[in-house]
Amino acid sequence: MAFFAVYFISLFCAYLQKKADAALASKLILMGVNILISGVFYAVLSRLVFVNDYPFQLYWSEGNRFYDYSTLLGGYRYLTANNGRAEAFITPGMALPWGIPFLFSDLSIGAFRLYYQLVWIIPPFLLGWTALNVLKSKDLLSRHAVLFGLWAFLFLDQGPIYTPLILSAILVVLASRARLIPGILLVMIASYYAHISRWTWSYAPGIWAVLMTLLQIDSPSFKKTGWEVLKKPLLFGTAGAFGGLLLPFIMRSEMASSLINPLPFTERQPLLWDRLLPNTNFSPGILLAVLWATLPILAVFVIFSTMKHWRLNWMQKSAVIVALCAFFSVGLIASVKIGGGSNLHNLDMYLVSIVLIASIVFTHGWQHIEIKPINRTLAAVCLMAVLAAPVTYTLQRHERPVVPDAEIARDALAAVQAWTYRAANQGEVLFIDHRQLLAFGYIKNIPLVDDYEKKMLMDMAMSGNAAYFTQFYDDLANHRFKLIVNEPAILISLRSEFSFSEENNAYVEWVTLPLLCNYYPVYTSRETNMELLLPRTIAPVGDTRCTDYIIPAAGQSLSQ
């Protein structure tokens, strides 16, 4: 894949030598465009390498996330108590974009992996393409709109940013182009959808709607002559507040109570502020990474806003600064919460805001600035930096799926199928991990135990939620489950210099130790990252830590 980046850059360098008479500014911009296209090729292909029909998970949370997505529209796949809905550690809004294919009963894991990656690729492009006002253009494939869409994809892929927030932003863009009443409805829908996806996003669509409309007004003010032009941003802001804040209470959203406290997660889980700086989880650290990702485009904002014929007044500048600072601050706090800090995805509202502001700059601002030779060169240098900066982040990717030989995967699949069907005849089977085996029909007609999913256990462990684990420990001690499907359990506490040591140690303390005190591995496949556990009939020998967990009287196990 890296070959494509090198190839396109080399090809364009040869083109520049041939066109030596081209203006310097044009050369710089075209160079940036070429680098951008090369980076898009690399980013897309680096995602598509994860498309295969391997039945086990390719990374830590993949399989269970696929299960989560399936529960919204594909709950018919599972046998649940009283034919109830399958529960999952996900919100409806977050599940929706990826849940649609589960309407088809014969969906394969390979087809879904392709769809899953396309949902990460296409919506960011559509946001950029739509934001450049192409819907009013006769040429829907305008090269400027396409290039801005490609840049938006690559810029947001630095997060990467979750699709539901991007879909909300697209609705806001459409609202800013629409008449007043349809626009208000679109903003309300965008805000409510953002809320049911992640409650911290509830405020974003309304703020974006105000920004998008305010920045397109010439010198807005509170004077009598200016109130008329301010009507649209004020009504859009009100619609956003209603859709994201009041409507959830009316609809009795489970997440509505979170809005009472603006930052409730600061009380639930510890904040690790050292993750703002270079660390073992994320080598540049959050602060340096976000500065590298956004400084070039922020410089363009400053340059364009000070050039003649496109000056922002105090109201517009204040709106931009306040919105960006607020989203930046919230993103930093979310990034240092335990479990985060490995990338920029928690700065999602900040990064999407920059894309939306950039669309206004390049549609409204570019048409109104007076380009002098020195300004043209300066603007070209900045634009080349804007186009190239996301590529430098993309080229750092080195993730590749590690898939064992097909024979190893077949043996592991046969083992989990045999043990699961055998255990199901005697009682319940718990899939802490590898729930994709249920979602895609590798294991059928097994009653689903939707409690104690791996990501939920991790979240509760990081919160130190003793009340939640009381029932879990009782179920383990009483051998409620005749078989548990999990990842290989390791009782190792990591020192602070190791990646995600805090998360690992919390999980070992709250989950792994109690689990192994009551269950033992009967089958382990480290190549497929799967382990099967049976109830213990006697406590582990020599491990005094298990004295805190009661082992009931010996009973008959599957292996006896």
Image (tube, rainbow, N blue to C red):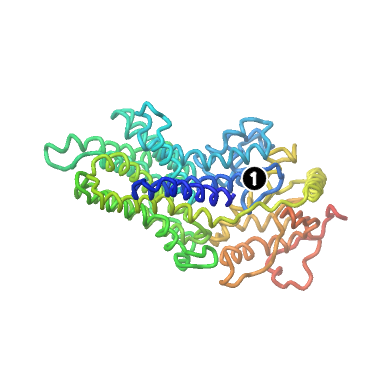
State which quadrant residue 529 falls in.
Answer: bottom right
Amino acid under disc 1: Asp
Up-down relation of residue 169 to residue 136 (above or below): below
Q: Front-most of 473 and 126?
A: 126
Of the pair 305 and 408, the residue shown nearer to us:
305
Residue under label 1: 450
Label 1, residues with CA under 10 Å away: few <14, some 14-19, many ≥20? some
Residue 328 or residue 284, whichever sits in front: 284
Q: Residue at x 34, y 47 (%)?
A: 23
Taking the image as drawn, is residue 406 in sight? Answer: yes
Image location (x, y in percent) of residue 49: 63, 46
Left or right side of 40 for 192: left
Quadrant where the image shows the C terminus: bottom right
Residue drawn at (67%, 49%), measured in percent from left and top?
Answer: 57
**Is any atom of residue 252 visible in this view?**
no
Percent x, y for residue 554? Answer: 82, 60
Q: Residue at x 54, y 57 (%)?
A: 396
